[in-house]
Image: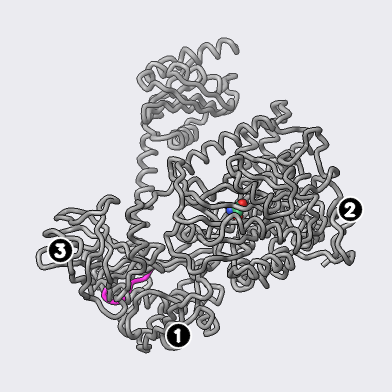
């Protein structure tokens, strides 16, 4: 790694060059808080778990929201993390400022109802001034104007001087429009006048780079609801966040976050690939920073299993990735490069984020594919821009409209900078004001849409109850019918005491045999009953508290709170689902054997009727591959492999070679389902006892569902039999219709196709004969106009092609003269005129047709020997034909 040039940095360390690296700083932070009784946890995924209000993890506190809101009892009182985060509202300024990123690491310490302000404040100060040894005289603090308590604590518990504490009315922090929030207090570093904007009023709070916020301490004590109302949380909490990149820039005396050891190796690689030295000019520096930042974000997002797509977080990922490619283009990189940068990111970050190694195949597959596809899009966009430029030049316009530039940006992902650059080469420009207006309007619409998408919150009464009950014991792995009890009944969010026939109710049971939809396996079907009442299960879901949410519709009698009930799983449906689920595991193994180890599950859906399995693979399966997969599957079925289910720790399961999906947490206990040596997967679903129970598996479809993604649908057991039977029935029906034996069908159909071909030929010949005889009779109508033979007549021709054919035949027969043929079709008139030989008596077909077509409300023209035209008024066709002699006469006399 090249050694960063830290000359000019403002902080000097004992021992001269001994600058802390980003890795050291991360470690120092976590260890410091471990020494204060915090548990060090690994970063959670960038995909927020069970949180419909957020697309991505935007702060260190996101994974802990259920603890702050006490939806779940926190398993420990304090934690500290370095959390992977992605924020995109500042996308456009990334690379232009010293401190913005899309992906960043946030260091944080958290208290779940344990310590509060009076500990959080002095600990933060201790870390900053005693561990990092930042000079006290360069530090500033902000507090909310209504948080005098925080101000007093800073004065009482730290060595900060009171005149260094400023009020900031914006010091109220929340992770989203609804959820936990609280006043906050920030620590700033004064980087010195040389980094400032130079304005007289430049002070703490100024937007320039002089005062850098390094740490935000949030005193989480309220919950904000949809109407914006704040209610106190059950307990007071602490959530702090310090951007690792920022603190590294301060500690390394770097000019920006990008000039730290966290970024320089990536930037150097970009520089190497483009041949443009870093710090050669401002513009290329911005592009390099964007490429470095975005490639890092994309690598981390992929490593958490986010797949590029056209909506949600997949869209965010694709957008960032495309931006990286576009900015690389500005630097002259027009070949695939993402992989080479990823290698550096993986080298420098995977010791702390092992998912960058574990999911390497997935990451590389998507990087390559997206890059390839986007290059093609860019080329297409370039062509469109070139066309546009040409037509503007022809029209003498020198600026591309803002709307056009924006549509290139939206549709082809063309950065406006690139558009500007390409136009500049032609001495043209872009209407940037128009572009900004169009972009603004687009943002407004997008915001409106996202507000409409605001997640529906479950009622407080339901969450309270779920929390009080906690995890519902699931008995359905062993038993399909159990006796249990109704612990709570809800209707439309309200707790009720009973529910009568026709009511739809949410029920919490003391124990449950019903499988809740998860891992792609659909909910069980079934019912509950008492002696006088029955209710049909419509859905079961598992909440964050582990409580099973059963949705029933009462079909008979009245259900009461506290009723002892018999809960019955629909055995047939459960067994059919289990067959499809086990078959899905076999399918995954078979696909890996036939196609290769790159095959990864991308989604699955298993019901009693069928299975759907989505996986990564980059081309469609050949018929031979499909047959091979189907054969392997059925061989495994016939081998009657025993199905074994074992519970173990995730680490042990991985070490044992089980196929895991994204999102499982370390330290969790997992179920490993294996079928002989053929398949071993982590899975919470329900399975058959031995693979022979599946009976038969039949693949019914295979197709693409997105870039690099395929889907297979298959049926198993009774459904496979039904499917084969229905294929057979169709075959028999066709055989009957064709009066043939099924085995002779193909020969019979080939014969029929040949017969159809012969018949078509015959029809064509007959048509030609008819046309010929029509021509003969038309020729009888030729009249002379001043010595020139003229045929002006109406013919039947369904379109212009047919009309021209008739004209050709007539022309050949007539040898010399003028043809004016009109045909009415679909409320319009078609005209063809021929003058043969060319120039006969000075006549011009184009001029004649112009006059004739005019009478039927049309126009046209053409060559002297042949012309065609249209008209709108078929009723005038006869009149126009009658006028032909007069029209010809006028031309003849003018020539004569
Ligand atoms: N949640 C706060 C922030 O992101 C502190 O961690 O700034």
Instruction: Assess whether residue 714 is covered by the magenta stretch.
Output: yes
Q: Residue at x 72, y 45 (%)?
A: 162
User: Which stretch did the figure color magenta?
Assistant: 712-718
Q: Which residue is mark 3?
A: 534
Quadrant where the N terminus sits is bottom right
Query: Which residue was labeled with disc 1?
Result: 678
Q: Position of residue 796 (x, y in %)?
A: 36, 32
Point out which mark residue 180 bears.
none
Q: Is residue 671 left or right of residue 358?
A: left
Q: Residue at x 33, y 72 (%)?
A: 715
Provide residue 208's location: percent of width, then percent of height: 76, 41
Dominant secondary structure of the residues highlighted in magenta in the image: strand
Q: Residue at x 64, y 41 (%)?
A: 384
Q: Which residue position holds label 2?
A: 8
Q: Is label 3 in a helix, a strand or a loop?
A: strand
C-alpha separation, residue under disc 1 versus residue under disc 3: 43 Å
Question: In this image, 72 relative to 210: left or right?
Answer: left
Q: Say what secondary structure mark 2 lies in.
A: loop
Does the closest atom of ligand 1 sit within 8 Å of the Cβ of label 2?
Answer: no
Image spot of residue 253 (x, y percent): 82, 56
Q: Disc 1, ligand 1: is the CB inside 8 Å?
A: no
Residue 157 vs 772, above or below: the answer is below
171 or 622, which lies in front? 171
Q: Is residue 421 left or right of residue 44?
A: right
Q: Quadrant of the C terminus?
A: top right
Q: Neighbour class for label 3 at 10 Å: few (<14), some, many (≥20)?
A: many
Q: Earlier in the sequence, mark 3 or mark 2?
A: 2
Q: Given this view, does label 2 or label 1 mark the residue nearer the observer?
A: 2
Report which quarter residue 570 is drawn in.
bottom left
Of the pair 299 and 425, the residue shown nearer to us: 299
One can see residue 273 in this view:
no
């Amino acid at each position: 790694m090249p050694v960063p040039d830290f000359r000019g940095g403002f902080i000097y360390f004992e021992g001269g060059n001994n600058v802390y690296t980003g890795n050291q700083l991360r470690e120092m932070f976590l260890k410091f808080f471990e020494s204060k009784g915090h548990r060090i946890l690994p970063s959670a995924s960038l995909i927020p778990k069970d949180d419909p209000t957020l697309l991505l993890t935007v702060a260190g506190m996101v994974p802990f929201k259920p603890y702050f809101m006490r939806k779940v009892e926190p398993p420990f009182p304090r934690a500290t993390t370095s959390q992977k985060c992605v924020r995109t509202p500042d996308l456009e300024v990334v690379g232009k400022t010293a401190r913005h990123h899309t992906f960043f690491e946030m260091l944080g310490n958290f208290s779940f109802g344990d310590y509060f302000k009076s500990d959080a404040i002095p600990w933060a100060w201790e870390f900053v001034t005693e561990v990092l040894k930042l000079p006290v005289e360069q530090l500033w603090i902000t507090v909310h104007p209504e948080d005098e308590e925080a101000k007093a604590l800073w004065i009482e518990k730290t060595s900060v001087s009171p005149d260094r504490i400023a009020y900031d009315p914006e010091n109220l922090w929340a992770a989203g429009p609804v959820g936990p929030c609280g006043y906050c207090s920030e620590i700033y570093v004064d980087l010195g006048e040389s980094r400032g904007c130079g304005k007289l009023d430049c002070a703490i709070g100024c937007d320039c780079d002089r005062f850098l916020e390094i740490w935000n301490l949030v005193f989480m004590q309220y919950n904000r609801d949809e109407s914006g109302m704040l209610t106190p949380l059950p307990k007071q909490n602490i959530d702090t966040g310090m951007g690792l990149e920022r603190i590294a820039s301060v500690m390394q005396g770097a000019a920006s976050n990008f000039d730290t050891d966290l970024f320089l190796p990536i930037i150097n690689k970009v520089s190497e690939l483009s041949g443009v030295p870093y710090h050669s000019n401002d513009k290329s520096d911005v592009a390099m920073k964007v490429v470095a930042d975005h490639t890092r974000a994309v690598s981390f997002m992929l490593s958490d299993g986010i797949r590029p797509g056209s909506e949600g977080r997949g869209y965010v990922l694709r957008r960032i990735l495309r931006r990286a490619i576009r900015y690389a283009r500005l630097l002259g990189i027009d070949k695939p490069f993402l992989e080479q940068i990823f290698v550096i990111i993986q080298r420098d970050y995977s010791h702390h984020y092992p998912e960058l190694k574990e999911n390497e195949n997935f990451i590389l597959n998507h990087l390559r594919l997206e890059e390839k596809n986007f290059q093609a899009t860019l080329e297409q966009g370039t062509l469109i821009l070139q066309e546009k430029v040409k037509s503007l030049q022809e029209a003498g316009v020198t600026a591309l409209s803002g709307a056009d530039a924006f549509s290139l940006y939206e549709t082809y992902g063309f950065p406006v900078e690139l558009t500007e650059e390409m136009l500049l080469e032609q001495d043209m420009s872009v209407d940037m004001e128009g572009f900004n207006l169009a972009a603004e309007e687009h943002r407004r619409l997008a915001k409106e849409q996202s507000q409409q998408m605001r997640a529906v919150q479950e009622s407080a009464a339901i969450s309270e109850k779920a929390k009080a009950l906690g995890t519902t014991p699931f008995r359905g792995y062993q038993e399909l019918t159990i006796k249990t009890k109704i612990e709570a009944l809800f209707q439309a969010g309200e707790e009720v005491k009973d529910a009568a026939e026709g009511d739809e109710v949410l029920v919490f049971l003391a124990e449950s045999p019903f499988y809740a939809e998860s891992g792609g396996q659909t909910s069980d079907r079934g019912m509950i009953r008492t002696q006088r009442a029955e209710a049909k299960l419509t859905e079961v879901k598992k909440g964050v508290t582990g409580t099973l949410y059963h949705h029933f519709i009462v079909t008979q009698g009245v259900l009461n709170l506290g009723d002892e009930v018999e809960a019955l799983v629909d055995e047939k449906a459960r067994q059919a689902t289990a067959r499809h689920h086990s078959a899905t595991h076999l399918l995954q193994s078979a696909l890996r054997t036939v196609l290769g180890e790159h095959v990864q599950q991308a989604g699955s859906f298993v019901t009693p009727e069928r299975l759907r399995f989505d996986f990564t693979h980059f081309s469609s399966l050949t018929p031979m591959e499909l047959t091979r997969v189907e054969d392997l599957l059925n061989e495994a079925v016939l081998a009657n492999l025993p199905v074994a289910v074992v519970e173990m720790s995730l680490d042990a399961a991985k070490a044992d070679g089980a196929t895991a999906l994204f999102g499982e947490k370390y330290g969790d206990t997992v179920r490993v389902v294996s079928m002989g040596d053929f398949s071993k997967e982590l899975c919470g679903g329900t399975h058959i006892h031995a693979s022979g129970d599946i009976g038969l598996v039949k693949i019914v479809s295979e197709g693409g569902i997105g870039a690099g993604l395929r889907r297979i649908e298959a049926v198993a057991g009774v459904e496979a039999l039904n499917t084969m039977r229905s294929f057979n029935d169709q075959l028999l029906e066709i055989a009957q219709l064709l009066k043939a034996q099924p085995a002779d069908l193909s020969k019979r159909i080939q014969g029929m196709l040949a017969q159809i071909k012969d018949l078509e030929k015959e029809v064509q010949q007959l048509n030609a004969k008819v046309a010929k005889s029509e021509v003969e009779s038309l020729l009888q109508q030729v009249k002379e106009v001043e010595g020139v033979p003229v045929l002006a007549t109406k013919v039947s021709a369904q379109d212009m092609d047919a009309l021209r054919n008739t004209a050709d035949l007539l022309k050949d027969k007539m040898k010399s003269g003028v043809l004016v043929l009109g045909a009415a079709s679909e409320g319009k008139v078609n005209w063809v005129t021929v003058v043969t030989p060319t120039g006969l008596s000075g006549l011009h077909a184009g001029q004649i047709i112009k006059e004739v077509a005019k009478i039927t409300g049309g126009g046209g023209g053409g060559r002297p020997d042949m012309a065609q035209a249209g008209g709108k008024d078929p009723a005038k066709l006869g009149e126009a034909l009658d006028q032909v002699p007069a029209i010809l006469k006028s031309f003849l006399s003018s020539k004569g």
